[in-house]
Amino acid sequence: MAQIAELLQYVATGLLVGGVYALMSIGLALIFGVMRVVNFAQGDFMMLGMYLTYFYALGGVDPILGALLTIPPFFVLGWVVHRGLLARVTGGGDPQRQMDAQLILTLGLSLVITNAATMILTPTPRGIRTAYATQAFAVGPILFNQARSYAFLMALVLAAAVYVFLTRTDAGRALRAAADDPEAASYQGIDVRAMHGLAFGTGIALVAAAGGLLATYYPIEPSVAVNFIVLMFVAVVLGGLGSIPGAFVGGLVIGLVQSLTLLVLPFQLQNTGVFIVFLLVLYLRPQGIFGRRARTV
Amino acid sequence: MARSRGWLAIAAIVAAGLVLAFALQERYHHRVLTLVLLWAAMGLAWNIISGYAGQISFGHQVFFGIGAYVTVLLVVKASLTPWLGMAVAVGVAVLAAVLIGLPTFRLAGIYFGLATLAYPLIFRIVMDWLGYQEVAIPMKRDHPGWFMQFTEPRAFDLLALGVLAATLVLSRAIETSRLGYRLRAVKENEQAAEAMGVDAFRAKMAAYVLSAAPAAVVGAVYIHAILFIVTPDAVFGLLVISQTLVVSLVGGIGTLWGPLIGAAVMVPVSEVLDATVGDRLPGIQGVVYGAALMLIMLYAPEGLYWRIQQAIRARAGRGAAAARPVIVAPDDAAAPSAPIGDVLLEVRDVSKSFIGLQALSEVSFDVREHEILGVIGPNGAGKTTLFNVLNGFLVPDRGTVRLGGETVTALRPSALCRRGLGRTFQVVRTFPRLSVLENVMVGAFVHTRAVRHARATAATALAQVGLDDRGEAPPGGLTTLELRLMELARCLATTPRLVLLDEPLAGLSTDGVDVMIAMIRRVRARGITVVIIEQTMQALLRLADRLVVLDQGRRLAEGAPADVTRNPAVIEAYLGKRWLARMGTPAC
């Protein structure tokens, strides 16, 4: 009985953390799904979102609200990065080359952001103090950390908002059309470049908000990006590159795997479980859980 | 000529390195020189898999880290000299490359790159967990040379120069060998390479192993010359791969000069910055590398080497577009052909479906030696799917294919090509960055290792299709007819017994069609069996001995052209029921 309770506790913790992973992964999946860009700098925008929420909190804004308030500035930032950098890399018409070049561009961007943040903000970890970070809701024998619970709920709300945006609004439909077939979409009068800007801006805004939510219970430091970008890649590949529901489920799964790994492996090896799942999925089902396998010939 | 020039250039680089190693005085300058040489070597190692083979690896620091950890741990635990330890490290790195490559090369494109990210992270975690967060090289005052602990900085310059020279020689050897041509073909168009007999998996694996070995040596030397202490972050971390990418991409990938140029430019810049402002701004190196990657992707994604070469060529190119003779149909077109022989290719009950679409269902027919068999059918009849099954791109759900009596169902295209099955594509698939002659050479390498022989075979094949004067041109400068002829020559260079031609007449002018038809007849006259797909019946009636008609994935009819065109089912498939009723007696 006690063992079952312990197991459930790990599952609960995993899911709570996974909700925030899901939100950040949706951002990455949206960018890849629409633009075919693997954004290496996604983790860095998340880190910046954590810092912005931290500074909001210094000014007295509750971090859950602060996370929401990162959305407008990061949307604009993402749009500018797309227009100023990514849209200029075309790969000379070869899609594979374009993809490689854009990935390397975002890798460069990631290096610049991480190191510039280290210079400006110093490597010292910071944290946001909230009353609820150390409180927990008890449901029977299982404890739900309050900060993580609020972050989880807000992540769900934002994910649902993205879903409604993509399926119920004209802009969302246009975005999906541009993702499915950019050429056909442009014949229908859809401005594909604007759609890419919209996707990148939204993707960055989502990951920044996820960073803000994460900041309620996770230390804030410039080097945090590397660990999370890999988790996001894993979640997105798990769900099928570019699939948004897939990325959501992928994020939850990553949270669960991370948490459950602790049952069998020491803490330092927490992420090996994640990587093993990642490699297994790549080898056994590279199109992911929700992905469609592309025709090869 | 060009060959010996390459070796001379390598000798010149080594000489320049020697001069610098002895001319420099300050310790700090030696450090910069050692770094330039080592990062150039690391870039070259990465360039073998990611430049030549085009498989962008974001995890190459795995081998660098293995080299560092294995040598240092052997010194610590077994007091083994790093000179031998390096050999062990290379062995471990090669083994790791095989173990990583086996599953990972099944992934294409971006999946490959993402998967490679995971390996160094796993190593990092495991090293942390094993308690190797910080392993210092123990001082060996009695035998400093034996333990690579020189006090004279020149010794490290020379060591790094030796590593660089060896990597340059290795790169040069790859560039000028069959493997080099094959890797470039795989990079440019993996499927066309497979169809031309290149086992893409084996080629990539060879490149991966060959690029892992020097990376391990660089890691081992780097730790002794620069770091002295191994930490997971320092050798498996993101900065190692970033630096590798920077020197390679800034210089230009796919050539051994790229990483050299990149290292010579970028390493001193970052070292000088680190020395001047590094104390106040600890992340300055990362910012510079990141900015360099972004700038190079934005303004010269091909890298400095190719940029410079382009500029030189543009200056030298003084209108090479001289009028060239129009290719005319060879007049030996009616040459007597060998008699039609036994069954060469046997297709039995082949079925293939894609999600919800039955592309082929129970298709059976024979191809006899020395015949020209036409496969016709309306759009979507399953013709190209049939070819993709026949040459191994697709595995049929059911049914068998036999070539010369041997069951070849589910063999890879490269294996089929080695057994004498050639193929061309509906949309010509070139290797765009190889010259026309080199394109054809890729095919010729099926039966020879020697570049000289391949070149001769390719030249002969080009002459056979009338393209002898176009060998040095890039495929981009060819007309549609010339491209189709080049693809035919590339296919002939594999010395096939049977060729599958996928709509070789598509997009050609009337004259072009005449040339192509004459060429195909000539191919057959040389004893090669031909299977040809066309949508238009007109051309095939002139060419084919027999026709197989496909419609909606089924074999509708088979027989002599005259009979097939009178078959009501065929007419209906092509023209519809109304036509059939109106025509009564069909004419074609």
Image: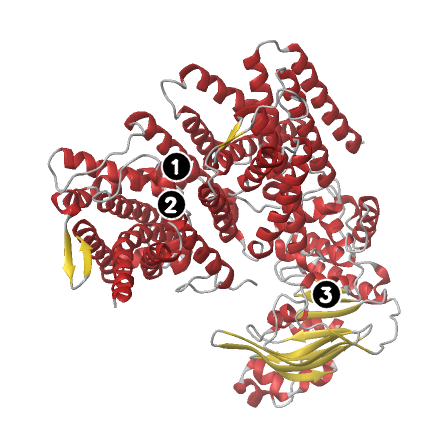
Along the viewing direction, whichever of A108 and B68 lies nearer the viewer: B68
| Quarter-of-image position of residue A121 | top left
User: Residue B529's spot in the image, x, y percent?
Assistant: 79, 70
Q: Are marks 1 and 3 in contact (CB under 8 Å)?
A: no
Q: Chain of mark 2?
A: A
Q: Are marks 2 and 1 in contact (CB under 8 Å)?
A: yes
Q: Is residue B253 visible?
A: no
Q: Is residue B237 visible?
A: yes
Spatial CA span between label 2 and label 1:
10 Å
User: Residue B137's spot in the image, x, y percent?
Assistant: 55, 28
Q: Is residue B355 above or below residue B155?
A: below
Residue at image position (41%, 39%) is: A106
Which residue is denoted by mark 3 in the rendering? B416
Disc 1 residue type (three-letter): Ser
Spatial CA span between label 1 and label 3:
45 Å
Disc 2 residue type (three-letter): Ile
Q: Secondary structure beneath disc 2? A: helix
Q: Secondary structure beneath disc 3? A: helix
Which residue is denoted by mark 2 in the rendering? A229
Q: Point out which mark residue A110 bears.
A: 1
Disc 3 residue type (three-letter): Leu
- Please rate how many residues cluster around mark 2, counting C-alpha atoms within 10 Å: few if below 14, some from 14 to 19, many from 20: many
Residue at image position (41%, 59%) is: A238
Position of the C terminus of chain B by quadrant: bottom right
| Quarter-of-image position of residue B88 | top right
Q: Point out which mark residue A78 bears.
A: none
- Please rate how many residues cluster around mark 1, counting C-alpha atoms within 10 Å: few if below 14, some from 14 to 19, many from 20: many
